[in-house]
Image: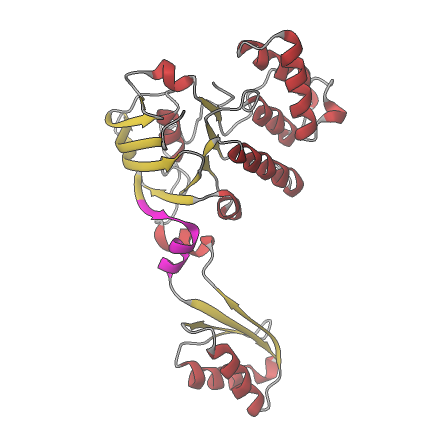
């Protein structure tokens, strides 16, 4: 029986020479949940993952994985985890199925069981037509799928996914999301780093935003969106009536109205969504026809841009720029 907390990390820090890759990262991940980790390039996300996956030792701080000490008992930790890094790491001379069989045998499966599990994953990741082709002829997206499948040969208690869908087409990305959801339904805990904010929104139970090696925000998606600010009212009118419509909206909403003449749209912050109906009535009373109207709450994109600093080029010595990847268990 696994404890209720999968990851408990306190004040992790890691430097590479004079470069501080991770300055102060603390996070807690309940068992059976998905934590999304966001942040600009070079923020320290991959370095944090590599520390938690026992690939590198933290300089300071403390962490446990299902109660096992990260640095004191790394063998026990490794028996519970699986990792897919940023870059696909597969044997190009082997076929897709042979790669998966190899990983299965390394994990202690019998030959028959390794082949059966490999075949199951080949089908799950949409690789049936290419199962017996050498990986050397695969596209980057196909290699990525083989790499992801390899990390799931054995259903891990904790799965680290470091930007797992980079380079995948939308259809394959959706397939990966489905696989992740299935794993979580089976009890697997997932720590996911991603640059696709929609992915984080779709999959994560909670989010952590890292910038400059520190946690700068945390919470579920809704709480982070609410932190950014109020909703926005967006209205489309005839371009020739844009200025008049803007005056009407300013009077009704008592707020700044931003106009986009190119598409005849007006955007204004709106604290109370019910004011949108009053705005439409006021526009119609002024003889202005409303073509479209929507009330939009802040997105994770808005959260990301408002919380993080301007992205900077990742330092050469930060392992976010050169990740040791592949499936590890």
Secondary structure mostly taken by the magenta-highlighted segment of the chain? helix
Q: Is residue 7 above or below residue 328?
A: below
Q: Residue at x 64, y 19 (%)?
A: 117
Q: Residue at x 53, y 84 (%)?
A: 245
In the image, 300: left or right of 63? right
Q: How is the image coloured?
A: secondary structure
Tell how many labels: 0
Q: Quadrant of residue 56?
A: top left
Mark yes or no: residue 73 visible.
Answer: yes
Q: Quadrant of residue 318?
A: top left
Instruction: Locate residue 287, reporting x and y percent.
Output: 59, 91
For residue 220: magenta? Answer: yes
For residue 274: magenta? Answer: no
Q: Residue at x 48, y 86 (%)?
A: 248
Q: Quadrant of the N terminus?
A: top left
Q: Nearer the viewer, residue 306 or 4?
A: 4
In the image, 181: left or right of 316? right
Q: Residue furthest front?
A: 1
Q: Quadrant of residue 25?
A: top left
In the image, 70: left or right of 237? left
Q: Is residue 293 above or below residue 182?
A: below
Q: Residue furthest right?
A: 129
Q: Is residue 272 above or below residue 303?
A: below
Q: Nearer the viewer, residue 41 or 293?
A: 293
Mark yes or no: residue 92 visible.
Answer: no
Instruction: Locate residue 320, reporting x and y percent.
Output: 41, 31
Residue range of the region highlighted in magenta in the rendering: 216-228
Q: Is residue 262 above or below residue 14?
A: below
Q: Residue at x 64, y 43 (%)?
A: 170
């Amino acid at each position: 029986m696994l404890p209720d907390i999968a990851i408990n990390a306190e004040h992790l820090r890691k430097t590479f020479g004079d470069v501080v890759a991770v300055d102060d990262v603390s996070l807690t991940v309940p068992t059976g949940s998905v934590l999304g980790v966001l942040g600009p390039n070079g923020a320290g996300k991959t370095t944090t993952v590599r520390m938690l996956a026992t690939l590198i030792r933290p300089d300071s701080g403390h962490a446990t994985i299902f109660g096992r000490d990260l640095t004191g008992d790394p063998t026990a930790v490794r028996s519970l985890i699986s990792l897919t890094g940023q870059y696909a790491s597969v044997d190009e001379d082997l076929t897709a199925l042979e790669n998966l069989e190899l990983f299965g045998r390394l994990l202690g499966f019998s030959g028959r069981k390794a082949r059966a599990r490999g075949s199951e994953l080949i089908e799950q990741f949409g690789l049936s037509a290419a199962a017996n082709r050498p990986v050397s002829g695969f596209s980057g997206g196909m290699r990525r799928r083989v790499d992801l499948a390899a990390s799931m040969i054995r259903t891990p208690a904790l799965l680290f996914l470091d930007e797992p869908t980079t380079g995948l087409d939308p259809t394959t990305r959706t397939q990966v999301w489905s696989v992740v959801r299935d794993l979580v339904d089976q009890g697997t805990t997932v720590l996911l780093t991603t640059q696709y904010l929609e992915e984080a929104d779709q999959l994560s139970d909670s989010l952590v935003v890292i910038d400059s090696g520190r946690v700068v925000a945390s919470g579920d998606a809704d709480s982070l969106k609410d932190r950014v600010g109020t909703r926005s009212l967006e209205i489309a009118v005839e371009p020739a009536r844009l200025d008049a419509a803007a005056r009407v909206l300013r009077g009704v909403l008592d707020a700044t109205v931003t106009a986009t003449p190119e598409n005849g749209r007006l955007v204004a912050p709106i604290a109370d969504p019910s004011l949108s109906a009053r705005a439409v009535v006021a526009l119609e009373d002024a003889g202005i026809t409303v073509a479209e109207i929507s009330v939009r709450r802040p997105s994770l994109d808005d959260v990301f841009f408002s919380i993080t600093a301007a992205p900077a080029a990742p330092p050469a010595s930060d392992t976010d720029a050169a990740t040791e990847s592949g499936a590890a268990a």
